[in-house]
Image (spheres, rainbow, N blue to C red):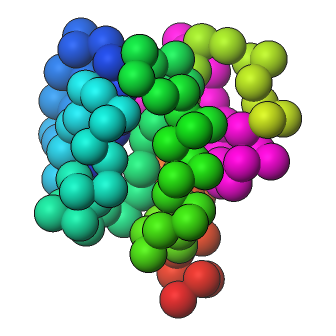
């Protein structure tokens, strides 16, 4: 499965993408929220993992942009250390919400659930 992980923390991107790659996923990473749409266009992900707190745009702002784009059907999992943004994230269209720290088994289950959403939307 193709996964795009958007997070401004390079250590999280490196570690989690390495683990997910070992589980057979094709992982693309983006350390900035500014080039989301061109990156999605180039990579065609099945699922997007999205941090909330990023310098350029918050994950919620990215979600609003995604929902008005041709990529609105791609399931999004928000991964953040701030559980207080859950309601706002869900209202913006996030499909799943996960708080940091998380374990990789939990992450893998969320990815499977989110990928089923895309199948059901097609």
Q: Is 107 a magenta residue? A: yes
Which stretch appears magenta?
A: 89-108
Q: How many marks?
A: 0
Image position, residue 7 (x, y; %): 36, 25
Closer to us: 4 or 61: 61
94 relative to 74 in the view: left or right: right
Res 83 visible: yes
Closer to us: 110 or 63: 63
Image position, residue 61 (x, y; %): 57, 38
- Look at the picture and state if 77 lies above or below 75: above
Res 42 quadrant in image: bottom left
- Look at the picture and state if 64 lies above or below 122: above
Image position, residue 77 (x, y; %): 55, 44
Residue at the spot 42% in from the left edge and 50% down from the top edge: 48
Pick out the residue farthest to the bottom.
122
Residue at the spot 44% in from the left edge and 41% down from the top edge: 49
Residue at the spot 36% in from the left edge and 65% down from the top edge: 46
Quarter of the figure with the N terminus: bottom left
7 relative to 10 in the view: left or right: right
- Look at the picture and state if 51 lies above or below 76: above
Res 1 visible: no
Q: Is 30 a magenta residue? A: no
Residue at the spot 24% in from the left edge and 35% down from the top edge: 30
Closer to us: 21 or 38: 38
């Amino acid at each position: 499965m193709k996964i795009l992980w958007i997070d401004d923390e390079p250590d999280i991107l490196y570690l989690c993408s390495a683990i997910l790659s070992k589980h057979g996923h094709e992982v693309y990473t983006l350390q900035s929220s500014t080039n989301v749409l061109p990156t999605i266009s180039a990579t065609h992900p099945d699922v997007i993992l999205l941090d909330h707190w990023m310098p350029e745009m918050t994950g919620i702002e990215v979600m609003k942009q995604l929902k008005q784009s041709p990529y609105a059907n791609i399931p999004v999992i928000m991964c953040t250390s701030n559980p207080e943004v859950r309601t706002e994230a869900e209202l913006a269209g996030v499909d799943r919400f996960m708080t940091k720290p998380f374990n990789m088994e939990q992450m893998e289950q969320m990815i499977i659930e989110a990928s089923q959403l895309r199948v059901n939307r097609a």
